[in-house]
Image (cartoon, coloured by chain):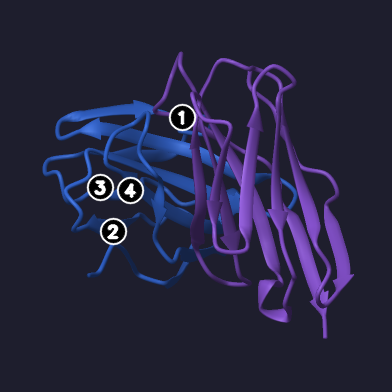
Chain colours: A blue, B purple
Amino acid sequence: NAGVTQTPKFQVLKTGQSMTLQCAQDMNHEYMSWYRQDPGMGLRLIHYSVGAGITDQGEVPNGYNVSRSTTEDFPLRLLSAAPSQTSVYFCASSYDPGTGELFFGEGSRLTVL
Amino acid sequence: KQEVTQIPAALSVPEGENLVLNCSFTDSAIYNLQWFRQDPGKGLTSLLLIQSSQREQTSGRLNASLDKSSGRSTLYIAASQPGDSATYLCAVRLWTNAGKSTFGDGTTLTVKP
């Protein structure tokens, strides 16, 4: 039972490069979301999705792009990486947006030089 | 805007003590409140989920209560053990936008043998 799987676990980028953080869940959850965690800032919501084909912005969406073509996958794209995007990124999912228990992946640590 | 506060930021106790962690929120129109545990360098592990219609939830040595009228939740840990050392976070979802969870900054607990 894999739960929420994130890849890669670690990544180093140069300023201006683009990349995609992958998130997959095998629990048939409708709701998926991306957070970033920074010291002193806590966890902040980047983007979320309430089902395939439906996405919405969170608290800090600028510089990130998402799509949801399947129930299982919710990739996060960094269009042109900046040092301010150095962070730990977490993907989370739940059965439904409101009442469901939120499950997290192990995180992806990104460093932008 | 929902604000979630956790006090204290850090707590150190001897093994065997019973302890209470606090979570306060400003908007009482919550859908649910969830408590998590995070070990260093790891993802968030769900501990307890309390729906808005519930007053408390229990799991083993953990008990979480919810008082919407006062905007407070507490996590009670009985007979603490060194393995309980971790950061504990609470997260709140609102009725107005259940797709967005707002997290507190967490309480870092150290249980000394």
Give the SS element for disc 4.
strand
Give the SS element for disc 1.
loop
Q: Position of residue A8 (x, y in %)?
A: 35, 70
Disc 2 or 3, which lies upstream in sequence?
Answer: 2
Foreground disc of the pair 3, 4: 3
Cα–Cα gap, marks 2 and 4:
9 Å
Label 4 chain ID:
A
Q: Quadrant of the N terminus of chain B?
A: top right
Tell me whether marks 2 and 4 sit on the same chain.
Answer: yes
Under mark 2, the amino acid is Gln
Please name the residue that numbered disc 4 is placed on: A77
Please name the residue that numbered disc 3 is placed on: A74
Please name the residue that numbered disc 1 is placed on: B100
Tell me whether marks 2 and 1 sit on the same chain.
Answer: no
Foreground disc of the pair 2, 1: 1
Between B8 and B78, the one nearer to me in the picture? B78
Between B31 and B4, the one nearer to me in the picture? B31
Left or right of A76 in this view: B7:
right
Disc 2 or 4, which lies upstream in sequence?
Answer: 2
Tell me whether marks 3 and 1 sit on the same chain.
Answer: no
Q: Position of residue B16 (x, y in %)?
A: 81, 75
Query: Tag 2: Cα neighbours inside 10 Å, few (<14), some, or many (≥20)?
Result: some
What's the residue at 46%, 33% (across, down)? Answer: A61
Label 2 chain ID:
A
Under mark 1, the amino acid is Lys
Foreground disc of the pair 4, 1: 1
